[in-house]
Amino acid sequence: MKSIEEGRETRRNLLLLLPALLLLALLFAYPLLGIVNRSVYKAGYTLDFYRQIFRVPVYLQVLGATFKVSALVTIVCLALGYPLAYMLATRRPRTAQLLMIIVVLPFFTSIIVRTYAWMVLLGRNGIVNQYLIALGLTDKPLALLYNQAGVVIGMSYVLLPYMVLTVYSVMRGIDPGLVRAAHSLGASRFQAFRRVFLPLSLPGIAGGTLLVFILSLGFFITPALMGGPGDMMIAMLIEREVEITLNWSFASALAVVLLALTLAGFAGYNRIVRLERIFEGRS
Amino acid sequence: MVAVRDVSVTIAPGSFFTLLGPSGSGKTTTLMMVAGFAFPTSGEVFVDGKPMAALPPQKRELGMVFQSYAVFPHLTVFDNVAFPLQIRKASRPEILRRVGEALELVRLTGYERRLPRQLSGGEQQRVALARALVFRPRVLLMDEPLGALDKKLRAHMQLELKHIQQHLHVTVIYVTHDQEEALTMSDRVAVMQGGRIEQVGGPAELYDRPASRFVADFLGESNFLDAVAVSAEGDGRWRCRAAGGLEFSGVGAVPLEAGQPITAAVRPEKLVQADDAGAAALGPGANACKGLVEEAIYVGDVTRYRVGLGADGAIIIKVPNRVGARPPASGAAVALAWSPEDTRLFPRVSA
């Protein structure tokens, strides 16, 4: 009985998904196959392009830098985003609404405009350095731009809302009665947070860090504008291969490696955090 | 808007005390003030003679069971029950022993490693109960804990809760809107309405001698008859005359005056047929009236009759379906009798 019902449900869901699936197949899966194909084909099938990536140190360095920056950005976003999401989820609705607007506001401006704005702020004679010097916190301007710090600041700013919104949506689903129950059982505010709220918000942390990390891996504009010559990320490398050296097969191989690493990261992460198990909620 | 005002009550240690009232009567707010989740603008809560109002909930050492269970979904049954002990830094062997005892008490031994989502609603509620009792709180607060359970399970849990409470001699403050539940479990009940306590008393006292029309109406079922107090008969008893001419005697819930408009309340099961064996026991001073059976509804253990009294309207009577009972047919004329002691008189507030 139940399986028939479920089968019907699945079929109906499939029907609803069909337009999106067709679009994805046409505009995503098909070109992706083309990229995979190009990465192993240039006047005959070859794995030379992949060998090149893993043999030439500079390419490995770019991969390493990409992961490092992505990890840093993820940590910064979590450290800034979790408390903010906590406020949003626990404050009175009106305060939360106002905060939420502030969080989402940057989405309404172009990422290029925002990146240039940061460049004005962070430059050698930018507002940030002027204030730091005026306050006597530093003698000479700090190098905040055209290096890794600049890239991390700029990317964290762009990606912070993704973290906040993901964590917030999970926190909103936590029954405030559970925290009350913890208090009634003798838990202090910190204990109730540490033993009840924090573990229950883990799916949000998992989802948010995963989202930010994956988005970071493929970031292009911010590192291109705010990074230095040594801060090349894999997306910039791909762009260079496509636009300048016109080595499309090598660019394709890089894209496939990026995709594979992203998927591997997702799978590994999924295994550690066991997302499905946490998200299951009810049985 | 004031949710609760002038609520003052003393609860004996080891007793089962219930706050009963319809939704919005202030019963949960009162409980939350005891728990520390709501704050009175004036007044004080004492537990064991110690003032509580300045203490946060976690310092009050009161166990609490919530309507939504509030069992921690990410923790096993064992860890849920161990939670208050871990907070209090109990030793590992002590935690093992006391969690074992608590789970035995609520008959969930063997469920230690399950997660809440693998339990039924009733089982989750038992976990919540074990968790609230395991640290031996001075008072156990319960906010409609059985509200989400089905009728059979609820009746079963009521008795079980009562037995646990008697076994542990723990003071319980219980909130419910279910009057049957309140009568079944409580030593004393406070009936609340509009943020005030209408009456406090034992179950029999509240049922047999309600202090207000609201209590007579909310607790069980009552026939209400508008009348006027005619003459005093002593000991708070009054002779009354209903609008349709029916005369009867009753006991004033409060002091009355001659000529005062009143509402009389009589429980449907206190009315007997005049030719019934029970009627003789009422003696010569009994109230009597005649009427016609307008409707008979068989509900299993009893039959409910609506008896028309002509100008005085209609009253409901409940007749047990005993062996050899001769139920009157619809349309039959019946003579009814009831005791003045079972007739409560309340001053009528002109609407």
Image (cartoon, coloured by chain):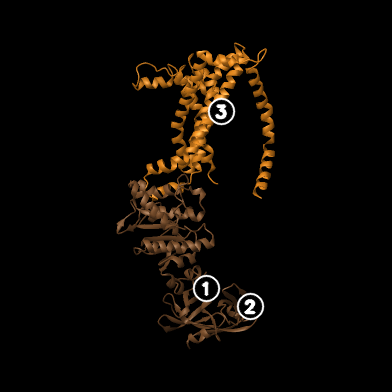
- Pointer 1 residue: B222
Q: From mark 1 to mark 3, how far is it between C-alphas?
A: 71 Å
The local crowd at label 3, few if under 14, some if 14 to 19, many if 20 or more residues have their Cα within 10 Å, is: few
Residue B187 picture location, percent across and down: 40, 67
Indicate the chain coloured orange by its letter: A
Residue B286 picture location, percent across and down: 49, 85
Most foreground residue, B166 or B343:
B166
Quadrant holding the N terminus of chain B: bottom left
The local crowd at label 2, few if under 14, some if 14 to 19, many if 20 or more residues have their Cα within 10 Å, is: some
Q: Amino acid at mark 3?
A: Leu
Task: In the rendered structure, find residue A263 and report the number of the disc placed on it.
Answer: 3
Chain of the residue displaying label 3:
A
Task: In the rendered structure, find residue A15 and report the number of the disc placed on it.
Answer: none
Tell me whether marks 1 and 3 sit on the same chain: no
- Pointer 2 residue: B294
Mark found first going from the N terminus, 2 or 1: 1
Residue A119 picture location, percent across and down: 48, 19
Seen as rendered, the residue at the extreme left is: B49
Q: Residue at x 51, y 34 (%)?
A: A271
Q: Quadrant of residue A149?
A: top left
Tell whether A143 sits left or right of B274.
left
Which of the two discs, 1 and 3, sits closer to the camera? 3
Q: What tint does the image give chain B?
A: brown
Tell me: residue B249, above or below residue B133. Answer: below
The local crowd at label 1, few if under 14, some if 14 to 19, many if 20 or more residues have their Cα within 10 Å, is: many
Q: Residue at x 55, y 26 (%)?
A: A262
